[in-house]
Image (tube, rainbow, N blue to C red):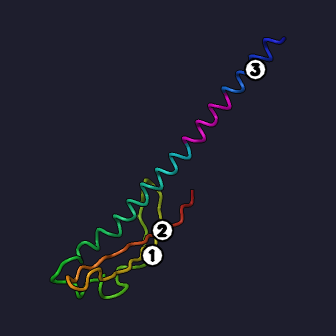
Amino acid sequence: MMEILVSLAILSIVVVGLINVFVASKALVLHNRNRMASGQLGRAFLDPLQLDVNQSTWGASCLTSGAGCVGAQNINIGGRSINFTPNYTRALDTPATGVNRVVVTINWDDDE
Protein backbone atom coordinates (compact mmCIF):
# COMPACT_ATOMS: atom_id res chain seq x y z
CA MET A 1 0.00 0.00 0.00
CA MET A 2 2.84 2.38 0.84
CA GLU A 3 4.47 1.80 -2.58
CA ILE A 4 1.23 2.73 -4.33
CA LEU A 5 0.94 6.00 -2.37
CA VAL A 6 4.56 6.92 -3.10
CA SER A 7 4.15 6.08 -6.81
CA LEU A 8 0.95 8.16 -6.95
CA ALA A 9 2.75 11.10 -5.32
CA ILE A 10 5.61 10.87 -7.83
CA LEU A 11 3.16 10.51 -10.73
CA SER A 12 1.18 13.56 -9.59
CA ILE A 13 4.38 15.66 -9.39
CA VAL A 14 5.29 14.62 -12.95
CA VAL A 15 1.78 15.35 -14.25
CA VAL A 16 1.71 18.80 -12.61
CA GLY A 17 5.09 19.56 -14.20
CA LEU A 18 3.81 18.53 -17.63
CA ILE A 19 0.69 20.65 -17.22
CA ASN A 20 2.87 23.67 -16.43
CA VAL A 21 4.89 23.05 -19.58
CA PHE A 22 1.71 22.98 -21.72
CA VAL A 23 0.35 26.15 -20.11
CA ALA A 24 3.65 27.98 -20.65
CA SER A 25 3.85 26.83 -24.27
CA LYS A 26 0.30 28.05 -24.94
CA ALA A 27 1.20 31.48 -23.55
CA LEU A 28 4.29 31.53 -25.78
CA VAL A 29 2.25 30.61 -28.85
CA LEU A 30 -0.28 33.40 -28.13
CA HIS A 31 2.54 35.90 -27.57
CA ASN A 32 4.20 34.95 -30.87
CA ARG A 33 0.85 35.15 -32.69
CA ASN A 34 0.37 38.69 -31.38
CA ARG A 35 3.90 39.61 -32.49
CA MET A 36 3.20 38.24 -35.96
CA ALA A 37 -0.12 40.09 -36.14
CA SER A 38 1.49 43.36 -35.07
CA GLY A 39 4.19 43.02 -37.71
CA GLN A 40 1.68 42.29 -40.44
CA LEU A 41 -0.59 45.13 -39.32
CA GLY A 42 2.37 47.50 -39.42
CA ARG A 43 3.31 46.32 -42.87
CA ALA A 44 -0.29 46.60 -44.10
CA PHE A 45 -0.34 50.23 -42.98
CA LEU A 46 3.20 51.20 -44.00
CA ASP A 47 3.29 49.61 -47.47
CA PRO A 48 0.87 52.13 -49.00
CA LEU A 49 2.62 54.97 -47.16
CA GLN A 50 5.98 54.23 -48.75
CA LEU A 51 4.50 55.33 -52.06
CA ASP A 52 3.97 58.76 -50.50
CA VAL A 53 7.57 59.09 -49.31
CA ASN A 54 8.80 60.80 -52.42
CA GLN A 55 10.31 64.23 -52.65
CA SER A 56 8.34 65.18 -55.75
CA THR A 57 4.94 64.38 -54.15
CA TRP A 58 5.70 65.00 -50.47
CA GLY A 59 3.60 68.13 -50.14
CA ALA A 60 0.48 66.41 -51.50
CA SER A 61 0.83 63.00 -49.83
CA CYS A 62 -1.42 61.69 -47.08
CA LEU A 63 1.48 62.03 -44.66
CA THR A 64 1.54 65.78 -45.09
CA SER A 65 -2.01 66.63 -46.09
CA GLY A 66 -3.76 65.35 -42.97
CA ALA A 67 -5.75 62.25 -42.18
CA GLY A 68 -6.07 60.89 -45.70
CA CYS A 69 -4.35 57.60 -44.84
CA VAL A 70 -5.64 57.22 -41.29
CA GLY A 71 -8.80 55.41 -40.30
CA ALA A 72 -10.17 52.05 -39.30
CA GLN A 73 -9.00 49.27 -41.57
CA ASN A 74 -9.37 45.49 -41.78
CA ILE A 75 -6.86 42.75 -42.58
CA ASN A 76 -7.06 38.95 -42.70
CA ILE A 77 -4.18 37.27 -40.84
CA GLY A 78 -4.07 33.51 -40.56
CA GLY A 79 -7.79 33.15 -41.16
CA ARG A 80 -8.66 35.82 -38.58
CA SER A 81 -10.22 39.11 -39.57
CA ILE A 82 -8.61 41.90 -37.53
CA ASN A 83 -9.98 45.44 -37.37
CA PHE A 84 -7.27 47.96 -36.59
CA THR A 85 -6.88 51.70 -36.32
CA PRO A 86 -3.54 53.15 -37.40
CA ASN A 87 -2.39 56.64 -36.60
CA TYR A 88 0.81 58.54 -37.16
CA THR A 89 2.52 61.68 -36.00
CA ARG A 90 5.03 63.60 -38.05
CA ALA A 91 7.75 65.75 -36.59
CA LEU A 92 10.55 67.74 -38.15
CA ASP A 93 13.68 66.27 -36.54
CA THR A 94 16.25 68.71 -37.78
CA PRO A 95 14.95 71.96 -39.20
CA ALA A 96 18.27 72.68 -40.90
CA THR A 97 18.14 69.57 -43.08
CA GLY A 98 14.37 69.19 -43.26
CA VAL A 99 14.47 65.54 -42.18
CA ASN A 100 11.05 64.31 -41.03
CA ARG A 101 10.28 61.56 -38.56
CA VAL A 102 7.03 59.60 -38.78
CA VAL A 103 5.90 57.61 -35.72
CA VAL A 104 3.20 55.03 -36.44
CA THR A 105 0.88 53.69 -33.72
CA ILE A 106 -1.47 50.81 -34.50
CA ASN A 107 -4.26 49.74 -32.12
CA TRP A 108 -6.37 46.60 -32.47
CA ASP A 109 -8.57 44.37 -30.34
CA ASP A 110 -7.48 40.76 -30.13
CA ASP A 111 -10.58 38.65 -29.65
CA GLU A 112 -8.67 35.52 -28.66
Q: Tag 2's secondary structure?
A: strand
Inter-mark Cα distance, 3 to 2? 49 Å
What's the amino acid at mark 1?
Ala
Q: Is residue 4 above or below residue 72?
A: above
Mark earlier in primary sequence (3, 2): 3
Q: Residue 57 at x, y = what percent?
A: 19, 83
Q: Residue at x 21, y 85 (%)?
A: 96
Q: Residue 99 at x, y = what percent?
A: 24, 79
Q: Residue furthest left?
A: 56
**Contact between labelled residues 2 and 1, with CB atoms less than 8 Å apart:** yes
| Res 102 quadrant in image | bottom left
Q: Main secondary structure of the magenta part?
A: helix
Q: From the image, tell me which residue sits under label 2.
A: 83
* Left or right of 92 in this view: 104: right
Q: Quadrant of the C terminus?
A: bottom right
What's the amino acid at mark 3?
Leu
Magenta-colored span: 15-25
Q: From the image, tell me which residue sits under label 3.
A: 8
Q: Quadrant of the N terminus?
A: top right
Q: Residue at x 44, y 70 (%)?
A: 106
Q: From the image, tell me which residue sits under label 1.
A: 72
Q: Nearest to the eye among marks 3 and 1: give it.
A: 3
Q: Residue 70 at x, y = what percent?
A: 39, 79
User: How many residues crowd around disc 1 within 10 Å: few (fewer than 14), some, or many (20 or more)?
Assistant: few
Q: Residue 37 at x, y = what percent?
A: 43, 58
Q: Tag 1's secondary structure?
A: loop
